[in-house]
Image (cartoon, helix red, strand yellow):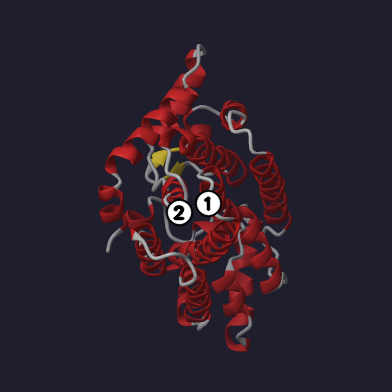
Amino acid sequence: MKLWDIYAKMKNDVSYIERELERTVVSDHELLNETTLHLLKAGGKRIRPVFVLLAGKFGTYDLEQLKKIAVPLELIHMASLVHDDVIDDANTRRGSMTVKSKWDNRIAMYTGDFIYGKALTLVTELKNPDIHLILSKAMVEMCLGEMEQIRDFFNTNQSVRQYLLRIRRKTALLIAISCQLGALAAGADRNVSRLLYRYGYNVGMAFQIRDDVLDLIGTESQLGKPPGNDILQGNITLPVLYALQESRLQEPLLKHINEIRLNNGHSDATEALDLIRYSDGIKIAEKLADRYIQKAMDALAQLPNQRAKRNLKDIAHFIANRNH
């Protein structure tokens, strides 16, 4: 089943969340309206709100309550992307101009800050202190992940463990708490919320590894940006780390990465991409992503049988096989 087939079954609720996203970021400030709406209209999979809604099916499903989790989590994700684009000096995302390229870095940073503020304002309407504690801890971890990524730009000596910790903080945690908080907001059993967290964490790890693989093997039309963009920005991802472990490729690959670094990313990544694609790095990374998907399935197996469980299983399969 494709992701959009799942969305189609939830069309009314997902559309409601989309309208709430727009309503939440509207302000009296003309420029902020332009930047935030530009960001919203650039689209996205809205996978975090979908996880919140599906997790809510394991408790008392109340869209008015769940939106207070679904909307803030998507806004936090969007704000982190705006800040990422400034750090990475990215001109496009999903085929559209980024806020920093259409306006400038300062406007982008304040847009991101504004969206964060809006997210936190909405979530305060939920009175469960556990929700606020989980969310605040996750946001701290996300910031640490961003700092680690900056620290490790062009660091070809980093370990696989460093990479995994970074993507845990940058990507997996927000997906994990989307599942966990959706369940908590719906009053689901604590054990159910823990299993959903475990599912979301493992799906999130697989999602990011698969994303990093796609950056190396995808086409510009699939990605909405040129392939090899991570390398050009200095982001050394899992397939690259594995490729660097192959003695026959280490020296030429290090040479090309160093040239990219010396040119501040204004280089052609084609030769580096050819070496990585020739290596076993992509295959090994995909196997690790598959292991994370299996762990997600193991967590799902312990949940009550219902349609939401089947949908979560379908999403995991989508992530395992995604090509965009």
Q: Quarter of the image for the C terminus: give it.
A: bottom left
Q: Type of residue at label 1?
A: Ala
Pointers 2 and 1 in contact (C-beta within 8 Å): yes
Looking at the image, residue 13 sits to the left or right of residue 108; the answer is left
The residue sitting at 59% across, 78% down in the picture is 242
Viewer-proximal residue, 301 or 171? 301
**Residue 37, numbered label:** none
Viewer-proximal residue, 101 or 263? 101
Looking at the image, residue 7 sits to the left or right of residue 238; the answer is left
Picture coordinates of residue 107 (x, y %)?
58, 26
Q: Quarter of the image for the N terminus: give it.
A: bottom left
Residue beneath label 1, please?
188
Viewer-proximal residue, 275 or 23? 23
Residue beneath label 2, please?
58
Task: Pick out the residue farthest to the bottom.
Answer: 248
The residue sitting at 51% across, 47% down in the picture is 182
Element class at badge 2: loop
Picture coordinates of residue 4 (x, y %)?
28, 53
